[in-house]
Image (tube, grey):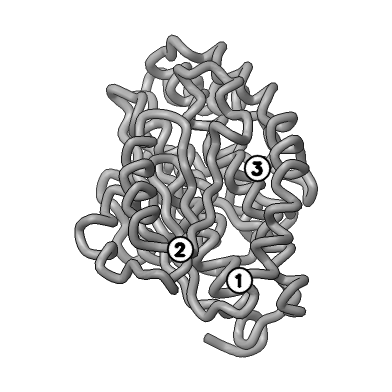
Amino acid sequence: MACCPKSIIADILKAREDKGGIVNVYYVACGGSYAGLHPGKFFLQSEAKKVTVDHYTANEFCHATPKALGPNSIVITQSHSGTTPETVKAAEIAQKAGAASIVITFDDQSPLAKNGDYVLKYEAKAPADQTGMAFGLKLAVEILNQVEGYENYDEMMNGFDRIDGIVKHAKEFLTPRAKKFAEEYKDEKLIYMMGSGANYHVAYSFAICLLMEMQWINSSAIHSGEYFHGPFEITDRETPFIILMSEGRTRPLDQRALDFLNRFAEKVIILDAKELGLETIDDKVSEFFNPLLMGSALGCYSYELSIARKHPLSCRRYMWKLQY
């Protein structure tokens, strides 16, 4: 079995070289894993001219399976435990359709892994370039480069080499801020997240997984580009926002939203990729590394919030405790 993104994609393409190759890619998962696959989808959506890509929550993929799914498809699924029922079912559907099934998981002996033609296993405390999110993005880069060619391939590989050092520095830099945030916001009942581009699903994941699931704090993720089309009406001095300022093409969307928040809100927490060192990656590709940086950086905030609230990140009311 091929063991790295580059060899996996080469193997898939070789098996289909006289059968139409690969024409579409589906990223499929649930919750935080679903959000973690978005960077790969965003990359292909931005850079590919021929290969199409989509991003599904697993149960929707199972119930509303795209008719384009077939032998010329790659389906990339992810689940940390490898036991998420909807994702396991999605991988089964992919294999039955003749698609190449790639599984990203922490447990390479899990039910999900058994439904993968290829398995990428990540470790619990993996470097930033070896996480599940990074694997999803690396697969996208390899698909594009091997199917169409990618002029910025070397720059992307250099970015992967750099990102772990950037993340480590960012977490050290942000820890005092995260502690201050936790003390000031530990009693809030609601915190909104905001972001754009490759960062949007980082905001989404922090809202639904870290705040709602793990801290029982009401939240919602607002796309910076959608803020002025409804959500900005709830802005006031008492409502907290965490805004992720991206490096790259969608930064003007974030800046416009931040400018408004600075006029009408007081509880605004800013995480800025420029301040955290992402500009050290070539600007032709740096935006694609936003989520690898921000996802890790926000981990400081969730950890410190759990300490200040005396509410462990492992605490649940319903999840894993009953049938649902």
Q: Which residue is mark 3?
A: 119
Q: Is label 2 or label 1 in front?
A: 2
Amino acid under disc 3: Val
Q: Residue at x 43, y 10 (%)?
A: 151
Q: Is residue 154 left or right of residue 73?
A: right
Instruction: Between label 3 and label 2, give the one nearer the viewer.
Output: 2
Marks 2,1: beta carbons within 8 A: no
Whichever of labels 1 and 3 marks the residue nearer the N terminus, that label is: 3
Q: Residue furthest toward the left? A: 229
Q: Is residue 206 left or right of residue 81?
A: left
Q: Which residue is mark 2?
A: 266
Residue bearing mark 1: 185
Residue 170 visible somewhere in the drawing:
yes
Q: Quadrant of residue 135?
A: top right
Neighbour tally class for label 3: few under 14, some 14-19, many 20 plus, Cα within 10 Å: many
Residue at the image position 64 percent from the left and 75 percent from the top: 186
Q: Residues within 10 Å of mark 2 (few under 14, many from 20)?
A: some
Q: Name the spot of residue 91 as percent of width and height, x first.
A: 50, 54
The answer for how far apart the CA atoms under marks 2 and 1 are is 12 Å
Mark 3, secondary structure of its residue:
strand
Indicate the position of residue 227 as horizontal and vertical percent values: 28, 56
The residue positioned 54% from the left and 32% from the top of the image is 274
Front residue of 202/119: it is 202
From the viewer's perspective, tell me whether residue 233 is left or right of residue 74. Answer: left
Q: CA distance from mark 3 to mark 2?
A: 46 Å
Instruction: Measure the C-alpha gap from mark 1 to mark 3.
Output: 40 Å
Vertical placement of residue 309 versus 157, above or below: below
